[in-house]
Structure formats: structure tokens, C-alpha cells
Image (cartoon, grey):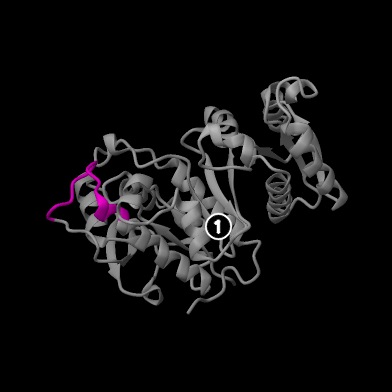
Amino acid sequence: MNKKPLIAITMGDPAGIGPEIIAKVFDTGEVFSHCRPVIVGNAGVMKKIVEDLRLSVSMRTIGTIAEADPASGKADVLHLANVDLAKHLWGRPNAASGKAVVEYVKLAAELAMSRKVDAIVTAPINKEMMNAAGFDYSGHTELLASLTNSTNYGMMFVGGGLKLILVTIHHAITDLPRLITRDRVLRTIRLAHAAMQGFGIEKPRVGVAAFNPHASEGGLFGHEELDEILPAVLAARGEGIDASDPLPADTLFFKARNNYFDIVVAMYHDQGLAPLKMLAFGNAVNVTVGLPIIRTSVDHGTAYDIAGKGCADPSSLLEAVKLAAQISKHQKGAGEERA
């Protein structure tokens, strides 16, 4: 019988809530019914949060992934000695934290690329701290794309009865009109189609959001729909993809949630994430599509204001792990014995 997928969970910012939500997920034991989880992070920080919160799970330090032996009641930590515990404070990040998170993600990505783990799940990081440490990325997605040499990738979110993918990710609103191009939209529609096929939907229905209110009313206020989005839709249909005309976003998400569409292509970050987080904040999952590895993540940030206080909700992390396990089971070779 094949083993459950082996999943690497990166610790995230040592000063944030990542260690806490990971410890809580391991402490309940529910995660072990879905996968064989291993933490990639700092063992000292993980032991500290367990002690601070008086959790029952025990932390075991390992030096290689081959030593991992996941089991309920304990957590294996693939240890990186990159946190000065004498100076560590919950809620007090610094550039060293930014460097540490990159090292966790880099190691996890290497394990996934070499197929020593089936998927990775990432706890939250702070983009400002990562950049302060000299890593010029706007987030996890761009960092992972660089680490895996990926150029055709996207950010998909699952939660609240919705699945959506973003044409643009972390950009200023003023920059969006020049970034909503036929090529970007077409690429994202293709990613949406492929992602849904990965979920077992043979002929997915892709709902495409307009950029302007009321899909610009035939060009009365904006031309992105006619000049860029509709041509991308027509090209996608020519490839056999079931993509809608650009539809007003204020009604599209209602239709998607009521099963008119399998996934929504949103033009920008807040257009997609505002409705999704209203429906599923704390339980939604971020999935990076188009990478040669499986990666899911939480839908929230480092929450420095509550870090270490014992009140962080681990629900999104648990959902991210469960979804990573589900996706990995569709991949050839998932669950096999690893080196």
C-alpha cells in the first residue's frame, strides 16, 4: 500500500504566527490522517512555542529528510540553525528573519524538485523583512518561481465555495491598466484550465472577470475589455477552453459560487481576494500553479500583533496541508517511498 504524501511545511517568519499555527496543527493530530508532515525551520523556535503554549506535541530535530518519521504526537523539524534564540522575540521581526524564511523555502523547494517530498506548504512571511535581507521578491510566489526557474505561473485561491486565479498579483492599482494585456490574460486562462483539470474536472468552465465596472459598457469607461480581455478569451476558445466573455465582477463571483463556473480569472489582487476572504477568511488556501512542484499556503500574514499569544487560528494552515495532500495524490508517483 502506498504511503500518504510526504509534505514539507516551512516555518515562516520566526517572529510571526507561523510556528504557533504549525505547532497547533501537529498538536491536534488531524494532519496525520492526510499526509506525513515534516517541518522545515528552526527547531529551537518550534520547541519554544510548544513550551510557551504548553502543547503536548514533542519536537524532534532531524538533519536530513531521510531521518523523517512522521507520527501522531510528535513533529520532526528539519533544522536550520539561523535564529539567535537569545534575541528571539515574538512579534519583533528583523532582517535576519527575512533571511531565515528564504532559507526555509529554498530547502523545501529543493526537496520537492528532487522529489524527496511530494509537496510543500508555506507558513506566512513578511515581504518587507525579506527585502530588507537583500532578497528582492514581492512574495512567496515570485521567490518560488525563481527557485524553480518558472516563468509561466499564477496565484490561485480556494475557499468559500470559490476557486480563482489572478492575472496580476502584487502591483499598484495605478500600474494595472498597462499590465492587463491579451498575453497575460490568455496565459492565466490557460493556467486556470490546466489547474482545474488537475482537480479532476475534464472540461472546466472558466469565468473571466472584466477589469472595469459593468465590463466598461461597450467602451464607455475603459477599453481593456475590448482591446485586451476579449481577444484573449477568443484565443482561448480557439484552443478548446470554455472561457466566458469578460463579465462584471460584481455578479461573476455570485455565479461562480452557485456553480455556473469552476474557476474565476480575476484581473487583480483585491478584485479576487475581497470576495473570497469575505466568504472564507481564515480557511482559504493559496495555491501556486504552473510550478514543477506542488505548493500551497495560508491566506493570511504573519500577524505580529498576536504572535506568541496563543490565539492564532491554525484553520487555514490545516486546509492548505489537506489540499496539498489532495493535489499530490493526483500526481504520478505521489506517496511512493522517498530517498
Left or right: 238, with 168 as reference point: right
The total of numbered circles placed on residues is: 1
Q: Which residue is mark 1?
A: 325
* Residue visible at 26% across and 47% down in the picture: 15
Q: What quarter of the picture does the N terminus occupy?
A: bottom right
Left or right: 305, with 337 as reference point: left
Helix, strand or loop status at disc 1: helix
Image location of residue 149, percent across then percent down: 55, 66
Q: Nearer the viewer, residue 214 or 40?
A: 214
Q: Nearer the viewer, residue 68 or 42?
A: 42
Q: Is residue 83 visible?
A: yes
**Residue sitting farthest toward the left:** 86
* Residue visible at 60% across and 60% down in the picture: 151
Left or right: 15, with 322 as reference point: left
Q: Is residue 251 magenta?
A: no
Image: 168 above or below 260: below
Q: Which residues are magenta?
A: 86-98
